[in-house]
Image (cartoon, rainbow, N blue to C red):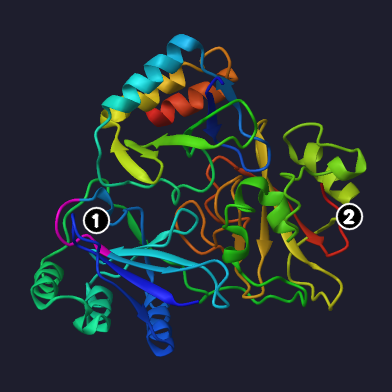
Amino acid sequence: MSTLVILHVFSGRPNPTWTLDDNQVAELSERITGIRRLTTNKPAGSLGHLGYRGFSVRRETGSPAGRLGLLIHEGVVDQGQDEPNLLAGNREIEEWLLLTAGARVPAAVAEHVREDTQRPRTPAMGLQEFEIPQAAGCPKCVAADAPPYSPSLWNIPSVQPYNNCYNYANNQATNTFAQPGRAHGTPATSMSCPGVQPSAQADGLVPCANFATPLAKGQGWYVALVIWPGQDYHWYRQDNVGCWSHKPGQTAVRNYDNAGKPISDPNTCNRGPYTVFCTYMVTNKSVVIR
Amino acid sequence: MALRVVVDLFSGRPNPGWTLDVANEAEFRRRLELARTAPSRDSRLLPGLGYRGLVVRASEEENAPELCRIHGESIVVSGSSRLDAGRQFERWLLSTGKGVLEPSLFEMVKLDVG
């Protein structure tokens, strides 16, 4: 199935649409993966004013290349509700997308879009931006089974709301919002380290002093348990790049802490109200959670 | 079906919440209607751990459709965004949970909302 581009510019007439060829799809992908800044802003075009309002790029779910749904305007790439928005910092993707239209966009309309893309970005309310953490500086991962950091497997509507930090740390999407010990009739007795850790051990996790001991294939990977005293627990997992990632409740998987920094050690990262670090543990594929 | 307010707060445990009574549901809809459209300050990204906003669901069922999410002067409704100037809407919505939400959690969120 083809990758469709829609130029949002008209009010009464249907908007111009065209498809990207394989080379153009590859170039778009390269341009987007090259963006290293996230933003909490949406493209201003989503408010629906008159005139140029951005480009949509769409591909259906059944496509071999996978579903795609982007809105690109004013240098912001809105990737849909399950992914953070990207901030390009310039209008090059929009200018490039306009070029892919060829004669399918009337010259006067193309000129209108070009004029818009050469204007500075509209200042927006409550703008928040920060860098996507880089893997550089991560500790070495010595667990052969450590999962890769693949948020796209988790940050989708059929998975994200039904799985929590415990699911993610164990790399098992049970869609049950899994609780330590529930699968073995030993639920947590309190929101404290001694209240939660034994439940995780009943599920098969094993406490350890650090994450430096090599784990051969079949021996699992490292996770970490932290506590918001009296209220809740939280889990991190070490990915195969060496840094750690986590899934706060029903929210999206991420590889940065509450300060927006990469997590080289969950014992020292910014954990918000989860102030108590309990222990590192080893989990593996045979652990049963529910 | 009654609307349910959920405090997006926890990571491991299910989030706490409460049901709006008829009068508060009417007030919620009135306030939502009055909120004006604004560029989004999408609060999904920060912070990850701790209070992340109030979510109003269409019914008391778990994982019922999300009607709106309110956090940090932003109201996200069906992908569009509205302004909650001074977080007044968020503060009011939180107040409907007083006496239902555990007092220490209520105070913690109240401190965040201001």
Q: Nearer the viewer, residue A290 or A277?
A: A290
Q: Which residue is mark 2?
A: A204
Name the main secondary structure of what is drawn in magenta: loop
Please name the amino acid that badge 2 sits on.
Gly
Residue A84: % across, % down: 43, 58
Residue A285 can be seen in this image: yes
Among the 4 quarters of the image, the one containing residue B62: top right
Secondary structure under badge 2? loop
Residue A192: % across, % down: 73, 36
Q: Which residues are magenta?
A: A49-54
In this view, B9 is above or below A207: above
Would you say the residues marked 2 and 1 are in contact, meaning their CB atoms lie under 8 Å apart?
Answer: no
Among the 4 quarters of the image, the one containing residue B90: top left
Question: Residue A45 bears which disc, if any?
Answer: 1
Q: Nearer the viewer, residue A67 or A191?
A: A67
Which residue is at the far bottom?
A23
Residue at mark 2 to residue at mark 1: CA–CA distance:
50 Å
Q: Nearer the viewer, residue A8 or A190?
A: A8
Which residue is at the far top?
B23
Please name the amino acid that badge 1 sits on.
Gly
Q: Judge if badges 2 and 1 mark residues of a common chain.
A: yes
x 28%, y 76%: residue = A93
Examine the structure image and report whether residue A79 is included in the region drawn in magenta. Answer: no
In this view, B109 is above or below A141: above
